[in-house]
Amino acid sequence: MKLVVSLITMLLVAGLLVTSPGCKKGKEGQKSPATKTATVTKAQTTCPVDDEQIDKDIYGDYEGKRVYFCCSDCRDVFNDDPNSYMQEMEGEGVVLEKVPK
C-alpha cells in the first residue's frame, strides 16, 4: 500500500513539474491564459485633438462614426488629418457612436 501511495505521489509531483508555468517544453506557440490581454473599450469623453471634455453639440461624422469635440476649432484640426486621430482613439479603446440614421 505504501508503494502505491508513493507512486501516486511521485506521479502527481511529476505532473505538476511538467505543467508549471516555468516549463516551456511542449508549449511553443501556445499562449497561456495569463498572457492573454483583454480589450478595454470606453465611450468618447474627451476631444481627440485637445483632450478637453467634449461638447455633445459640437461633432463631426467620419466613416459612419460620430466624433465629438470640445470646440469647433478642434473639429477643423481633426478634419485636416482624421485618420491619425481615429487610429489614436482606436488604440486607446475609444468606441465611437454610430451616426444616427
Image (spheres, grey):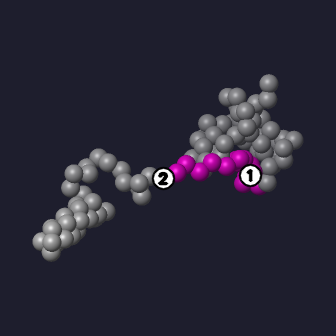
Residue at image mark 1: 46
Query: Amino acid under label 2?
Result: Thr
SS at mark 1 in the image? loop
What residue sits 27% from the left and 60% below the top? Answer: 19
What residue sits 72% from the left and 54% below the top? Answer: 51
Residue nearest the observer in this picture, 93 or 5: 5
Q: Residue 83 is drawn in which quadrant?
A: top right
Q: Is residue 45 magenta?
A: yes
Q: Residue furthest top?
A: 101
Q: Residue 101 is drawn in which quadrant?
A: top right
Q: Sequence-wise, which precedes: disc 2 or disc 1?
A: 2
Q: CA distance from mark 2 to mark 1?
A: 24 Å
Principal secondary structure, stretch drawn in magenta: loop
Residue at image mark 2: 37
Residue nearest the observer in this picture, 68 or 2: 2
Residue 70 image point, x, y percent:
81, 49
Residue nearest the observer in this picture, 87 or 72: 87
Above or below residue 10? Residue 30 is above
Above or below residue 53? Residue 76 is above
Residue 86 image point, x, y percent:
63, 40
Query: Amino acid under label 1?
Result: Thr
Residue 93 image point, x, y percent:
61, 48
